[in-house]
């Protein structure tokens, strides 16, 4: 913790890159842990049900699964989300890059959040591109339909779909310009998102994750503890 505190004190352009492990402390299960989504039993594997082709071919079944397993509108930010928002308010954190679609970083007060995989809170008509709030998807009996008759699709990146090139470019630039990069709650096994780490060339690469990652050997500091507890304590110590 002392090493982490001194790194954060010395930094003035911190970027945080996080994954599902950031939100598990808010009660949102991740995909790949022992009790995660990939280890539950469904008629189809989750990666099939969350694919673009499944959305097109089995739209009603897609939404049944999506509403049941991907939306946690009652979830609240945890100490990790709040600590990062505080770090940004202090002028030290320049961006949060997240693979999560739950919107908790924004809810916690973070201003510059780059959502690599989109957000459940944004939805649009595939025909006329009209925007719709989360409530429209949640309250629909089966398939949410726009006034024009088009299907309303969540603005999340499904399997078989590419990441938004602008968000990807902004994320790469933020990491490239960072003097400290904190990576938390991600296995760093999902590409192209995990490939963003290579844009960092500084000497303050901090990994906070309960399990090993492919980048552990390159990190300047590895912490295997609760991300919420670690970030909350580290930011509190900066005051």
Image (spheres, rainbow, N blue to C red):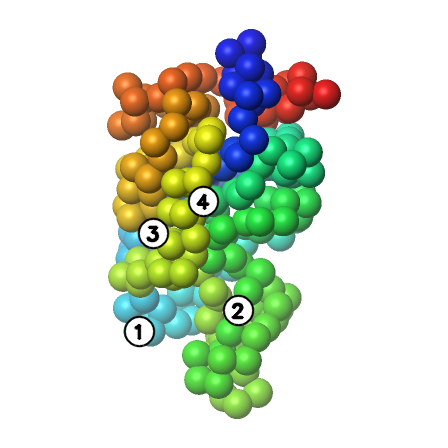
* Residue at the (38%, 18%) spot, across then down: 220
Tell me if label 2 and label 4 are in contact, CB under 8 Å: no
The residue labelled by disc 3 is: 46
**Quadrant in the rendering for residue 6:** top right
* Residue at the (31%, 61%) spot, across then down: 162
Q: Which mark is residue 123?
A: 2
* Residue at the (49%, 37%) spot, across then down: 15
Q: Residues within 10 Å of mark 1 (few under 14, many from 20)?
A: few
Q: Reply above or below: 200 against 125.
A: above
Q: Residues within 10 Å of mark 4 (few under 14, many from 20)?
A: many
Question: Which callout, 2 or 4, points to the residue nearer the camera?
Answer: 4
Q: Quadrant of the C terminus?
A: top right
Tell me if label 1 and label 3 are in contact, CB under 8 Å: no
Q: Earlier in the sequence, mark 1 or mark 3?
A: 3
Q: Earlier in the sequence, mark 3 or mark 4?
A: 3
203 or 138, which is in the foreground? 203
Q: CA distance from mark 3 to mark 4?
A: 31 Å
Q: Reply above or below: 115 against 16.
A: below
* Residue at the (54%, 54%) spot, across then down: 71
The residue labelled by disc 1 is: 57
Tell me if label 3 and label 4 are in contact, CB under 8 Å: no
Question: Which callout, 2 or 1, points to the residue nearer the camera?
Answer: 2
Instruction: List x then y, in percent, for residue 136.
Output: 61, 71
The residue labelled by disc 4 is: 174
């Amino acid at each position: 913790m002392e090493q982490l505190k001194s790194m954060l004190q010395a930094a003035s352009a911190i970027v945080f890159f996080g994954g599902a492990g950031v939100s598990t402390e808010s009660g949102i299960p991740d995909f790949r842990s022992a009790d995660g989504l990939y280890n539950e039993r469904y008629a189809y594997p989750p990666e099939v049900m969350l694919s673009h082709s499944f959305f097109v071919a089995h739209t009603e079944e897609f939404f049944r699964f999506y509403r049941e397993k991907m939306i946690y509108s009652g979830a609240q930010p945890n100490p990790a989300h709040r600590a990062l928002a505080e770090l940004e308010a202090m002028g030290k954190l320049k961006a949060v890059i997240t693979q999560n679609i739950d919107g908790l970083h924004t809810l916690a007060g973070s201003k510059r959040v780059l959502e690599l995989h989109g957000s459940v809170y944004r939805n649009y008509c595939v025909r006329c591109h009209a925007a719709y709030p989360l409530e429209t998807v949640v309250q629909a009996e089966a398939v949410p339909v726009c006034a024009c008759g088009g299907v309303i699709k969540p603005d999340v990146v499904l399997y078989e779909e590419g990441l938004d090139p602008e968000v990807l470019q902004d994320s790469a630039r933020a990491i490239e310009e960072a003097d400290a990069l904190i990576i938390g709650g991600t296995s760093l096994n999902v590409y192209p998102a995990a490939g963003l780490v290579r844009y960092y060339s500084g000497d303050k690469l901090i990994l906070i994750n309960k399990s090993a990652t492919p980048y552990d050997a390159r990190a300047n500091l590895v912490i295997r503890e609760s991300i919420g507890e670690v970030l909350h304590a580290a930011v509190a110590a900066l005051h």
